[in-house]
Amino acid sequence: MVLALQICGALIVAAALLQAGAGAAAEINRVLGNRRMDRRRLEQFRTRTDILIRRADADRQRSELTWAGKRKFRVAERRVENRAGDICSFVLTPHDGGALPPYLPGQFLTFELKIPDQPAPVVRCYSLSGSPETRDSYRVSIKRLPPPPGADLPPGLSSSFFHDTVKPGDVLDVMAPNGSFCLDTHSDRPIVLIAGGVGLTPLLSMLKWLADTGSHRETWFFQAARNSDDIAMRDEIRAITDNNSHFHSVVLYSQPTETCVQGKDYDRTGFLTLDVLKDTLGTSNYDFYVCGPPPMMEMVTASLRDWGVPDSDVHFEAFGPASVKKPHAAETSGKAIKVEFTRSGKKLVWTEAEGTLLELADANGVQISSGCRVGNCGTCSTALTRGSVSYVAKPASKPPAGSALLCIACPQGDVALDA
């Protein structure tokens, strides 16, 4: 009987010890779990803090290191980017050896080119295609523009100059980074980047910035091209998306050749349509950035609108003068408006059929310096001595008070210009 009681007591003690042990184990697991969660939260906090510090430092450097007017840059490297050979990158370093301001992902450089047989320097803007986190050089990637189809016109003047003449060691006049087609670097919203042809350049800069700053924003990069001969920088994009679980790329070929292998060279055949976006994304809850030829941008932006994407979530870059919309009768009511070019002594009549004020000046022999013709470079900024204008496209930066960017300006009434 005593032995039985002893055994029973031992069992009770053992059960109590087991229960206590289980409780202790559960408590230990809870504490360890809390510590792991605290470490994850701490790591997330440190990452977020690091990003904010880097952004603030970049903002400060942009303000302190930017320059006014022209600055000399040396061409450090020239590299062909596609099989067709019509897209070429140029890496530029400051000739004075000074520091460079970081730029916002999506911005461009403005060049003043001394092209032989041209009566005046030619001003052109080209998007930066490198990473804004690269602080010792800038990179632009330029497509050689052929003559317009069906027109007896020469090929692109500045792009031909870059491809045929500019080589490593040459020195170019460059203005500071500029432009309003920029990634919102302070947002955490998911992003869709849609590139057509060489329109990929500002979007690639955005993707590189996201990767180099350790962003966890979900990002999709859609790249549309005709085939493997035309596509550029695909390997750069894949190197980023393949090594980051938050980033994804989709390559579309509209005219794949027999040597193009689906699943290796490209992902889908055809054009980028709304059905492709819906099938891939599933939801429209993204910020969309679009850059490419005008017909593609018109189609994509209209499709996004049909999908219910708010205009505030769709950002696009003007891609040459054809991207700038023309004034409509609703904007001008069909009125004939008087335009005076005071220094030229010309008094003209403007109607909506004339286009922009720069087009009116060109058609009537009024010499006005211009460059990009899409409101980016500011070369056509002209003093407005009387009246006011409206813009048919958003300027990259606000012109000085009392001046107007004539390449995208239309008069709101009778005006006088110092030209």
Image (cartoon, rainbow, N blue to C red):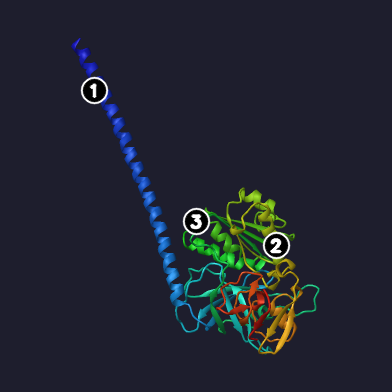
Which quadrant of the figure has residue 75?
bottom right
Q: Is residue 404 visible?
A: yes
Report the quarter where the C terminus lies.
Answer: bottom right
Q: Between residues 208 and 70, which one lies in front from this camera angle?
A: 70
Task: For marks 2 and 1, give the CA distance.
Answer: 80 Å
Q: Earlier in the sequence, mark 2 or mark 1?
A: 1
Residue 180 to residue 15: above or below: below
Q: Is residue 373 visible?
A: no
Q: In the image, 143: left or right of 138?
A: right
Task: For marks 3 and 1, give the CA distance.
Answer: 57 Å
Task: For marks 2 and 3, give the CA distance.
Answer: 27 Å
Picture mark count: 3
Q: In the image, 185: left or right of 154?
A: left
For the point 38% across and 46% down, the residue is 37
Query: In this rendering, which labeled residue sits more in front, label 2 or label 1?
Result: 2
Q: Which residue is mark 2?
A: 298
Residue 28 to residue 337: above or below: above
What's the amino acid at mark 2?
Glu
Mark linked to residue 188: 3
Mark linked to residue 13: 1
Residue 202: x and y, percent?
Answer: 58, 67
